[in-house]
Image (tube, helix red, strand yellow):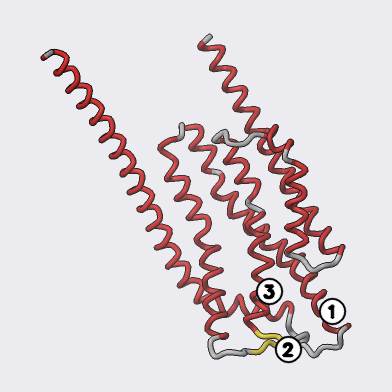
Amino acid sequence: MAIAATETQQDYSHGDGKAEGSLMSLFDHLNELRRRLIYVLLMLTIGLVIGVVLAKPAYNFLIDRHTANAIALHAFSLWDGIGMYMKFAFVIAMIVTFPFTIYQLWAFVKPGLSKNEQRSSLKYVPLALMMLLLGLAFSYFVVFPLAFDFTRMVAGQLELQETYGIAQYFAFLFHIVIPISLLFELPLVIMFLTAIRIVNPIRLRKMRRVAYFVMVVTGVTITPPDFISDILVSIPLIALYELSVWLSGTIYRKQVETDKRWEDELG
């Protein structure tokens, strides 16, 4: 009886030790995540300072490109000017902070990766910035002019006098540019999910019809209701999905080859 009681106490003590170790590990991860978030917030603050400096030149560029000699923008509230200034500063800060945020995410998951995985996943940081800038360029130089000209054409057909507020104009701009820019990150997201074995190209090919439907609905939603604009946006979005499937396939084939080598070595 004494021996049994001693063994039981030892089992409980071992169990408590494991639980305490797991809790410490969890707390360590939470502290690390908090530290990375603090870094991102500090970088965002620096980005806001840069955004305040660049807000006026960015505003002048956008105004000169689309609204010069076309329409006059008005302030319908005392806060419209300040609000637009800060929105520009925040958007610029987000662009500046974006690659740093991706790097902090990589640094957070780095301890759980092998050396090869660390090197291969680090390349996602510059690629994420490149895809974001590509999405910004496509949405601003291709999609937004189509939407802008279409809305003015409809106003002209209805013989409306165009009087636009600055807040409404840039809300219209940002609602087009920001979603499309984020959608351009789809290939990188799919590559990452494939690398951690959540998705694979086989599953993505089976979901192709649903994905095409989602892409077309997205393209129709963020563009003016005319057939040409819908096609010009939906086709690149579908191409992004197909690129994602192809990139997933390259990663998946390497995973299969690695698994086969391990099986041959262990077998």
Q: Which mark is residue 172?
A: 3
Q: CA distance from mark 3 to mark 2?
A: 14 Å
Q: In terms of secondary structure, where does tag 2 sit?
A: loop
Q: Amino acid at mark 1?
A: Val
Residue 97's x, y, as percent? 50, 61
Q: Residue at x 64, y 34 (%)?
A: 200
Q: Residue 65: name its quadrant.
A: bottom right
Q: In terms of secondary structure, where does tag 1 sit?
A: helix
Residue 78's x, y, as percent? 54, 90
Q: Assess whether mark 3 and mark 1 are in contact (beta carbons under 8 angstroms).
A: no
Residue 110's x, y, as percent? 44, 40
Residue 44's x, y, as percent? 45, 64
Q: Amino acid at mark 3?
A: Phe
**Would you name the residue on which mark 2 appears?**
163
> Can you say whether 189 is above or below 22 in the image?
below
**Among numbered discs 1 and 2, the one appearing first in the sequence:** 1
> Can you say whether 80 is above or below 206 in the image?
below
**Would you name the residue on which mark 1 appears?**
154
Q: Is residue 176 left or right of residue 147?
A: left
Q: How many badges with numbers are in the image? A: 3
> Can you say whether 211 is above or below 37 in the image?
above
